[in-house]
Structures are given as structure tokens and as C-alpha cells.
Image (cartoon, helix red, strand yellow):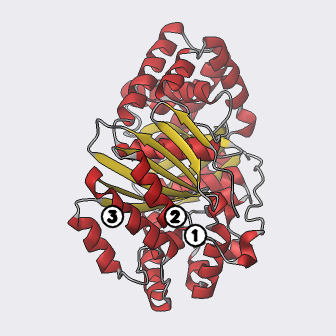
Amino acid sequence: MRSDKRQVVSSLYRKRFLDNGIRLVTEQIPTLKSVTVGMWVNTGSRDEAPSEAGYSHFLEHMLFKGTKTRSAADISREIDAIGGEMNAFTTRETTTFYVKVLDQHLPRALELLADILFHSRLGAREIEKEKQVVLEEIRMVQDDPEDLAQEIHTALMMGRHPLGRPVLGQESTIARLRRDDLRRYFELRYRPQEMVLAVAGNFDQRGLDTMVDRLFGTYSPSEAVVNTNGHGRWPPEICGGVIVQRKPLEQVHVCVGLKGVAAGHKDRFAAYALNNMLGGTVSSRLFQEVREKRGLVYSIYSFLSSYSDCGTITIYAGTRAQEVERVLDLIRREIRKIATQGVEKEELRRTKEQMKGSLMLSLESSHSRMNKLAKDEMITGQHMSLEEILVHIDAISQTQVVSVAQELLNEKTLAITCLGPLAPRLVTALKA
């Protein structure tokens, strides 16, 4: 397969298609002494069949467990010897492998990354050992009530949709996993057209292109999967409802959820502003009303989860069992208030300044720049510069925020999850 050699150039940003279809996106930042390389694969837990639950995350682990020429210890020693950082993470839609090094060590970083991606042994003995590691990771979530509450809450909001499944998978599917299963999953999902190689920091573009073509441009999956449709994604229907799960804890962990926006939605900047004002910062309405004024919680915050075709808003709070009803009432009151009364001009101005400051600070490292490059490419296929984002933030209006609030903060789709030492009377009241 040979794609046309299209190239998009904007300032220090470049995009190029390798011969095999892998997209290379780069941003030169000469003022830095570091460079970060990340391979993003357009596959995650939502792409797994029920019998494959957890395969994406397990494969992420296994690619570090040895290649044809390096043992797992060799990989660790090599990255430590150059003072670098090498890691990976799996989400519901993507799997990412990255290396961050000083700029002079870029050739070694690229070679290491290509080796673990394309030459991993996926040894049967290593798979059996890693099963125990991943099973312990799954059990850790069960012991972390904040994580567990949010996992239960996601399942409630997504219903039976694959987005509602835990990224780590199920103990039963991990226990049954075999080497042939993992190899087939890799061949099907890790196809060049689903891969984005993002590089940000200080480097020479011509030298980088030469190395990337040699190390990444010749990779191709087996003929059996070249023409296979690897994705069958469909958007979920965001569900409301109540789940109350009793557990002997010190606090009740509360999640309140509403519909959000997709990652590339035209109103996403207004939605970010809305979330910041609701519960995204320490000056937000929920933090000030529930924690600062009344002292009912230590932790309360809201966040957006945006996927390729949908999104959610989640509010989390941890409180004493006797305060659950009061906290929920206050959360609902703030939701109604912002949806019916809108936002003040000065509140929106402060929020936009906070968004711009947070954005600029977050993009001061090569790692964060690499993340942004890849996400832009995977979500929209286009790069948005910092200056363009700032223009979008400045353009957010009160009218737009009100419109988005009225659409998203609809209590008809309200989902509530409570985990902790709730009395039976309160369980009955919440479910009523």
C-alpha cells in the first residue's frame, strides 16, 4: 500500500504520510533541549469484543516485555542509561507509547520505540506472568473507592455500550487470554492507517524523516488483515438513572453525570468554559458553595470526558453518609441555576483567562506538545495552533455558554452513583 506523499506545513508544524500509511506529525521547538516521540494507535477498550475485554491494555503491557534483540531488562537499562522516560497508557479509544529524551538521544528513542512496537516477542511465559500484574491492577481499582465509583458511574451512563466497560478489562477475560489471541488482536488493531507518530521538541526535520522512514515506514501487517475493517464504532445513548452500592467505607463517594460533547464538537470550547465554572477549578461554583461555604466535602470537582462521537460531564464528591442528600441537593441546585440563569460577564471573563493561562502552561513541555499534536490529528485530522485556540477561547460568549448549558445540563438524563456506607433508608430515598 502506498499513499500519496502529502505534506502540510504551518510554522514549525509538519504532517506527512509514510509509504505504509502511518501519519507523521511533528512540531519543532528549538528553544527546548528535549524531544518526545509518541506512537498513538486508534484502538482502545471500546473496540474490544466482550470476550476481549482488557486486551488493549494488556497488549500495552506486553510490548515492554522483550523483543527479538532486547529483554525487558535491556529495554529498561537502555532508557535509564540516557536519562530518558519511556511509558505507555491505554484509554477507551487509544493506546499510546512514548519516549522522552534529551535531543541528542533522539535516534536511540526512535529505535527503541520501533523495536517494542514491531518486534516484541509476546512470549507465552511472559504473558502468564503479566496476567498476575494486570489482575493486581484490576484489584487496586476495587480498593480505591474514588476510582471504583467513577467506573461504576461510567457503566451506568453508557449502559451496555462498549464505552461503559473498564479499560483494564475483566478478571475472567484476562485469565483466559492466550498468546494467539493477543497476536491476532495486535495484527487486527495495529494497522498503519490507524497509527499516528507524533514528535515534538528540538530536532532536525530532515534527519528525523530519514530515521522515521527506515524504522517505521516499512511496517505492514499480515495480508489476512490488510483489508479488514478494524473498527465498528457507534455512538452510545447516554443514560440516566441511579445506582447505590453499599460498601463499608469512611465516606460516600458520589458521582453525578450529564450529557457532554464529542471531542471535535463545534461548541467544545464553550463546554470547557461551562465545566470550569461549574466545578473545574477551585473558584468554581460547586467548590465554593459545597466545600468553602459549607465544609460538606474535602473533594468536589467536575470534568468532561470527550470521545470521538459523544461525551459526558461528571461531578464527583466525597462526603459523610449523613450529608449525601444535602450535597446532592446543592449539586442539583447549581446545575439548575447555571442552566436557567446563565453566567455573569465577569465570571466568564475570569474563566476565559484561567483557560488561556492553564493552556499555555500545559504546553511548555515537549511531552504535552506531543500529546496535543497526536490528539489533533486523531480527532480532526488538522493541527490547531496555540494562537488559534486562544482566538476560540476569546470568542466564547455568554449566549453560547447559556445555549450549551441548556442543552447539556438537562436533569432528564441525570445519572447518580453512590458508593459507601449508606443507610437502607437513604438507599430507598435515592432510588425513589
Chain-order first, disc 2 or disc 3: 3
The image shows residue 412, relative to residue 367, as above or below, that is above
Which kind of residue does numbered mark 2 sit on? Phe
Q: Tag 3, which secondary structure?
A: helix
Which quadrant is home to the N terminus? bottom right
- Are the two marked residues, 1 and 2, in contact with CB atoms closer than 8 angstroms? yes
Residue at 23% over, 62% down: 82
Can residue 178 be seen here? The reply is no
Counting from the top left corner in percent of width and height, residue 347 is at 48, 14
Q: Tag 1, which secondary structure?
A: loop
Name the residue that disc number 1 marks: 219
Q: Quadrant of residue 403?
A: top right
Counting from the top left corner in percent of width and height, residue 250 is at 39, 54
Q: Tag 2, which secondary structure?
A: loop
Q: Badge 1: few (under 14), some or many (20 or more) residues near its Cα, within 10 Å?
A: some
Give residue 216's mark. Answer: 2
- Are the two marked residues, 2 and 3, in contact with CB atoms closer than 8 angstroms? no
Which kind of residue does numbered mark 1 sit on? Tyr
**Relative to residue 18, is residue 98 drawn left or right?**
left
Give residue 169's mark. Answer: none
Name the residue that disc number 3 marks: 108
Q: Badge 2: few (under 14), some or many (20 or more) residues near its Cα, within 10 Å?
A: many
